[in-house]
């Protein structure tokens, strides 16, 4: 029951975030807004697919598993994408030096 309540609040927050035209002022606000939009939009699309699968009685187990299990992968991916988009130079490539193995 708590999970469903959180999903409903996420959907409401997503709708409100798309309605607000004011740009976020700080990096923290930008991250929260972006996370809410991306995660909420993906979950809404998956919710529609899950609902349609229940109506059509087609692969309901896979659809519901995808809807409930996507949070494991979706949240870290969205956080990484947001951080990289906010500061693209945060990842600096390093040169790997090969050294001979001394036995």
Image (cartoon, rainbow, N blue to C red):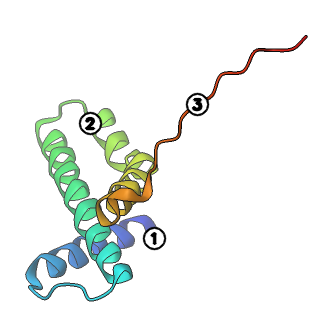
Which residue is at 16% across, 52% downward? Answer: 45
Instruction: Give the labeled residue for mark 2.
Output: 60
Instruction: Return the residue found at the far top.
Output: 103
Q: Callout 3: helix, strand or loop?
A: loop
Distance between mark 3 and mark 1 Cα atoms: 48 Å
Q: Which mark is residue 96?
A: 3
Q: Nearer the viewer, residue 87 or 20?
A: 87
Which residue is at 21% across, 73% downward? Answer: 14
Which residue is at 80% across, 14% downward? Answer: 101
- Residue 58, position in %: x, y? 18, 31
- Residue 18, position in %: x, y? 12, 76
Which residue is at 87% across, 14% downward? Answer: 102
- Residue 61, position in %: x, y? 33, 35
Q: Nearer the viewer, mark 3 or mark 2?
A: 3
Q: Callout 2: helix, strand or loop?
A: helix
Mark sitting earlier along the chain (3/1): 1
Q: How many numbered marks, from 0 up? A: 3
Instruction: Return the residue found at the far right.
Output: 103
Instruction: Give the labeled residue for mark 1.
Output: 2
Q: Are marks 3 and 1 in contact (CB under 8 Å)?
A: no
Mark sitting earlier along the chain (2/1): 1
């Amino acid at each position: 029951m708590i999970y469903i309540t959180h999903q409903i609040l996420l959907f409401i927050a997503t709708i409100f975030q798309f309605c607000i035209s004011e740009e976020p002022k700080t990096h923290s606000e930008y991250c929260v807004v972006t996370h809410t939009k991306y995660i909420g939009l993906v979950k809404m699309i998956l919710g529609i697919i899950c609902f349609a699968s229940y109506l059509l009685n087609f692969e309901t187990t896979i659809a519901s598993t995808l809807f409930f299990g996507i949070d494991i992968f979706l949240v870290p991916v969205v956080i990484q994408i947001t951080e990289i988009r906010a500061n693209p130079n945060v990842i600096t490539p390093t040169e790997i030096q090969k050294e001979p193995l001394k036995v």
